[in-house]
């Protein structure tokens, strides 16, 4: 009873004082605009450590035995994003043709995310084209010939230093890239298992004759533009890229010196992708009017037609067919494939993928990836190569390998 009487006398006082108290200094009166501004400025650091061993199945030697680390740093503030990615590698199995230690700044760019226009300046990876695994216009980044096989159906590409402008309009998306000093090309070292046979022969002959063979990279600009129209069930686009070949195609003898140079080419492309339920059909057609072929310069045509579908619950199947030909040369026909399926709530992924082409060329890969914990991933794979001598895949005939890798995410 005493407590009730005290509360009854105190309650009117509290009600009268409450508006003044909260108006003068309300502890719950947050400045939401300032908090939102502070929340927009964020730093995020991530990365992983990995050990990977590749054993050659033909000779029993180590193709690779590396410790690898990669770190990514991203800072966002409003519409701005800064991204940095670097890596460090120690691989003693490669010391006979390159330094065992390699440290690289792989990507470094500043991105502005505007309402209708996005701008990126710096070093990054840009993928063009609609085809999976193989594209006729994916030329913004050069193939990394030091180890060109990303997997059995795609090439590994190096990020490029560029300026990129993407404009979204009512009629479609326009994507412009300009590389002031061209793409960053890297060739394999002399004696590398990934060194093409013809390049190795030129280098060996030059050494035997005491000549200097230089593999010059161009430092002149490259660039292109792409237009994409997104629709209901159908996306289509056109693209153009003016740049150089990934590898050197011209051999010049200048007295005691010899030079290998890439050639400038222009590629026009049209592409489309259409969805049908759980299936997607994709296609690309490209024309290069000044391609340096075996019989001289001429027109090169390429097309890729692909199909992919999800069966049952998670079984993914992807198939592509491609053809490449010049008016005065033989055609190259082939295809790529991929079959993957996750198990045990996506903790385990098993798959097959590869490619084939004229000249008995074949690259085939079987792999297993297990997400052991949130931070630990185990991966195993085996890759096999076949092909006639002098063909792109035939040069890797002795590179069949089995691999095991353990990755710790940080």
Image (cartoon, grey):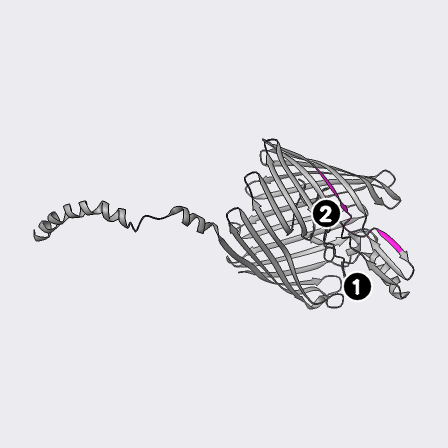
Q: CA distance from mark 2 to mark 1?
A: 25 Å
The residue lying toward the viewer, choosing from 170 and 221, is 221
**Residue depicted at x 51% and y 56%:** 44
Residue range in magenta is 239-252
Residue reaching furthest left?
1
Closer to the N terminus: mark 2 or mark 1? 1
In the displayed structure, 71 sits above or below 139; it is below
Comparing labels 2 and 1, the label whose residue is closer to the camera: 1
How many labels, in total?
Answer: 2
Q: Is residue 371 left or right of residue 33?
A: right
Magenta stretch: dominant secondary structure: strand
Pointer 2 and pointer 1: residues touching (CB < 8 Å)?
Answer: no
Quarter occupied by residue 369: bottom right
Q: Position of residue 113 (x, y in %)?
A: 56, 44
User: Which residue was labeled with disc 1?
Assistant: 191
Disc 1 residue crowd, few under 14, some 14–19, many 20+, Cα 10 Å: some
The residue lying toward the viewer, choosing from 258 and 208, is 258
Q: Position of residue 194 (x, y in %)?
A: 76, 58
Quarter occupied by residue 292: top right
Quarter occupied by residue 265: top right
User: Which residue was labeled with disc 2?
Assistant: 355
In the displayed structure, 194 sits above or below 177; it is below
Q: Secondary structure at mark 1?
A: loop
């Amino acid at each position: 009873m005493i407590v009730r009487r005290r509360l009854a006398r105190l309650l009117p006082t509290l009600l009268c004082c409450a508006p003044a108290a909260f108006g003068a200094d309300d502890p719950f009166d947050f400045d939401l605009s300032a908090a939102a501004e502070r929340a927009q400025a964020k730093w995020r650091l991530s990365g992983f450590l990995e050990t990977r061993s590749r054993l050659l199945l033909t000779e029993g030697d180590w193709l690779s035995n590396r410790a690898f680390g990669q770190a990514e740093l991203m800072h966002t503030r409003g519409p701005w994003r800064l991204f940095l990615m670097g890596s460090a590698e120690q691989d003693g199995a490669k010391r006979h043709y390159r330094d065992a230690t390699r440290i690289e700044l792989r990507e470094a760019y500043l991105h502005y995310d505007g309402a209708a226009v996005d701008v990126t300046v710096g070093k990054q990876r840009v993928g063009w084209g609609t085809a999976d695994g193989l594209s006729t216009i994916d030329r913004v980044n050069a193939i990394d010939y030091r180890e060109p096989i990303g997997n059995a159906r795609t090439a590994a590409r190096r990020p490029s230093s560029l300026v990129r402008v993407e404009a979204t309009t009512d009629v479609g998306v326009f994507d412009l890239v300009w590389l002031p000093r061209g793409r960053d090309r890297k060739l394999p070292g002399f004696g590398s298992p990934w060194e093409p046979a013809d390049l190795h022969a030129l280098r060996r002959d030059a050494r035997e004759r005491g000549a200097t063979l230089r593999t010059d990279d161009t430092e002149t600009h490259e660039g292109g533009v792409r237009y994409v129209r997104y629709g209901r069930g159908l996306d289509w686009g056109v693209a153009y890229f003016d740049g150089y070949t990934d590898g050197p195609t011209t051999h010049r003898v200048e007295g005691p010196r010899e030079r290998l140079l890439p050639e400038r080419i222009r590629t026009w492309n049209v592409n489309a992708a259409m969805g049908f339920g759980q299936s997607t059909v994709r296609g690309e057609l490209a024309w290069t009017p000044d391609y340096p072929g075996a019989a001289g310069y001429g027109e090169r045509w390429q097309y890729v037609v692909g199909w992919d579908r999800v069966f049952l619950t998670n079984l993914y199947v992807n198939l592509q067919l491609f053809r490449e030909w010049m008016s005065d040369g033989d055609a190259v026909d082939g295809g790529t494939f991929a079959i993957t399926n996750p198990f045990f709530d996506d903790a385990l992924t098993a798959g097959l993928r590869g490619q084939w082409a004229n000249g008995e060329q074949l690259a085939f890969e079987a792999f297993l990836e297990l997400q052991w914990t949130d931070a630990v991933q185990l991966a195993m794979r085996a890759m096999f190569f076949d092909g006639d001598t002098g063909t792109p895949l035939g040069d890797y005939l002795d590179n069949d390998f089995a691999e095991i890798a353990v990755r710790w995410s940080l």
